[in-house]
Amino acid sequence: MRAGVVLSWGVVLVCGGCAELRNVLAPPPDPAPRSQTVQAEAAVPSPKCPELIAQEAPLEAELVRSLGPRSFVPGVTLSELGLLRAPGAQVSSSFQSEVTLADGPVTLVGVTQESGAGLLMLRPAADGYCVVNSWSTWQSGALQYTLDSSWTSPDGRMAILLLKLVVAPGSPAEELRWVVLGTDGWRAWIALGTPPEHQLLVPSVRLFPKGKQLYLDVKLEHTSRFALGKDGHFITGR
């Protein structure tokens, strides 16, 4: 069975606050005269992203409506991604990393905005990047957000990502949340848990490679160990 029965192991899975990561991340640009828009569209054809990228729903919540799978972006800065700071919103880059798969590298860009966090998975393309998919969450307080660790299978077929969120850091209400994602470079998925209840509210989670196999150690009062299945999901059961 997949992670839908994780609760029987004593692991706490929680819904991550399923509201969107607010459209203030990408405020609409000032409208241009129609004549200028037509000329620009005629002069610069829209880049095409590979049809191998699955057009699936974003993971948990939408990061930005305009950045679904197969979307093209010219670069990885906040402005190139369309993640522009709106009045009163503090949008910042949390991390940038890369995993190398058999089908090519995938660039990982993490961003935060007030009490929201998001991750973009991008494939390098001519003159820019193509969006594989995105994950985002919205919490009730301030966030610290990092890519805790990642693992790539020996055959390069997939990568597993472990995201760490500290909600309300430094306050009496501080809590740790963990999210485990997978990608093969053409699509992405939640690797442990059933969305939207897939965030782990536990003190410690770690990826534990052993030979060609990957395990996930989840610590509550005791440590539960889950093995990665061939489909990229961690297997649960007694």
Image (spheres, rainbow, N blue to C red):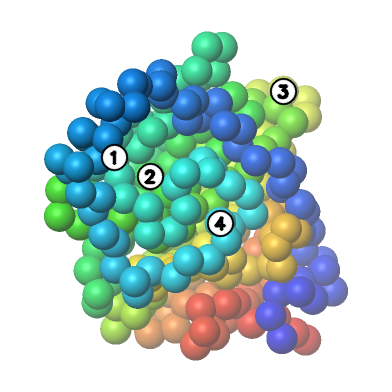
Mark sitting on residue 171: 3
Residue 203 sits above or below residue 33 on the image: below
Q: Amino acid at mark 1?
A: Val
The residue that mark 4 highlights is 58
Q: Earlier in the sequence, mark 4 or mark 1?
A: 4
* Disc with the residue nearer the chain's start (3 vs 4): 4
Q: Position of residue 71 (x, y in %)?
A: 37, 53
**Comparing labels 1 and 2, the label whose residue is closer to the camera:** 1
- Residue drawn at x 29%, y 83% is 155
Q: Amino acid at mark 4?
A: Pro
The residue depicted at 52 percent of the width and 84 percent of the height is 231
Q: Residue 174, how many percent across, how many down?
A: 72, 32
- Name the secondary structure under disc 4: loop
Q: Give the Cα distance between marks 3 and 1.
A: 32 Å
- CA gap, disc 2 to disc 4? 15 Å
N-term-proximal mark, 1 vs 2 = 1
- Whole-number angstrom distance, CA of label 1 to CA of label 2: 7 Å
Mark 3 residue crowding within 10 angstroms, few (<14) / some (14–19) / many (20+): few
- How many numbered tags mark residues here? 4
Q: Which residue is mark 1?
A: 76
Residue wearing tag 2: 109
Task: Tell me whether the residue at label 4 lies in contact with that at label 1, contact meaning CB atoms closer than 8 angstroms.
Answer: no
Residue 119 percent across, percent down from the top left: 47, 47
When the figure is inspected, residue 230 is found, relative to residue 61, above or below; the finding is below
Asked whether the beta carbons under mark 1 and mark 2 sit within 8 Å of each other, the answer is: yes
Counting from the top left corner in percent of width and height, residue 168 is at 68, 28
Q: Quadrant of residue 85?
A: top left
Front of the two marks 3 and 2: 2
Q: Is residue 178 left or right of residue 25?
A: right
Q: CA distance from mark 4 to mark 1?
A: 19 Å
**Mark with earlier residue (3, 1):** 1
Distance, label 3 to label 2, CA atoms, is 27 Å
